[in-house]
Image: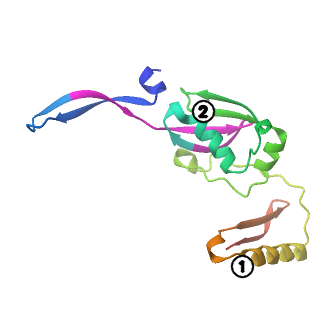
Amino acid sequence: MSSETTTGLSKVEVIKIDQTRIGEAAVEYVPAEAEFRILVNNEVETSLHCAPHRVKSLVVGWLVGEGVIDREDDFVAIDTDLESFDIRVTISDDAAQRLATRVFTIPVGKLSEPEFPRRVSTELELTPEQVVELSGRFRKLFLGLRSSDRMCYLAAFAQNGEIQSYGEG
């Protein structure tokens, strides 16, 4: 792999125009983003677009933003492969549990096609009455917020491979 790629720069031909409006071809190095596949504990989670020299910071920021890691002990290791564009992250068992209980992940780019289905397993046991009661609580919480504090929420309860209830506001 060339040094241009590992530093996040691509060598391209540009036309430079000076003050006399005379154009001249030149070679410049410009920032270049790449699509990185993010694997967390060897499971594909998403893909991110960024320049390779900042990919670790972006991945850690994504994990924090997704609520997966919230303390230093949650993060175990990160390994970048700039040839295959894979970023392998190892997180603690507690963080992996938080990741598994998220509602969904939206991949972008080439990964937006369902080539990497997300495995969901749960031992959540709810009666239809409990689902209705929990949905009512979410609605009251949402409607009780001041309009400037409102945010979109999403809730789904799955059992035996079927979605029992879904709501957003």
- Report the quarter where the C terminus lies: bottom right
In terms of image quadrants, where is residue 16? top left
Determine crowd level at label 1: few under 14, some 14-19, many 20+ residues with C-alpha closer than 10 A. Answer: few
Q: Residue 17 in the image: x percent, y percent?
A: 16, 36
Sequence-first tag of 1 and 2: 2
Label 1 element class: helix
Q: Which residue is mark 1?
A: 143
Determine crowd level at label 2: few under 14, some 14-19, many 20+ residues with C-alpha closer than 10 A. Answer: some
Which range of residues does the magenta coloring cover? 26-47
Q: Is residue 98 above or below residue 142?
A: above
Predominant SS of the magenta segment? strand
Look at label 2 and name its amino acid: Asp
The residue located at (84%, 40%) in the rendering is 93
Q: Residue 114 in the image: x percent, y percent?
A: 62, 50
Is residue 157 magenta-colored? no
Contact between labelled residues 2 and 1, with CB atoms less than 8 Å apart: no
Look at label 1 and name its amino acid: Leu
**Comparing labels 1 and 2, the label whose residue is closer to the camera:** 1
Q: Residue 85 in the image: x percent, y percent?
A: 55, 32
In three-dimensional space, the C-alpha distance between marks 1 and 2, rounded to whole angstroms, equals 42 Å
Q: Which residue is mark 2?
A: 86
Q: Nearer the viewer, residue 30 or 72?
A: 72
Q: Nearer the viewer, residue 13 or 145?
A: 145
Q: Is residue 118 above or below residue 34?
A: below
The residue located at (86%, 77%) in the rendering is 133
Label 2 element class: strand
In terms of image quadrants, where is residue 90? top right
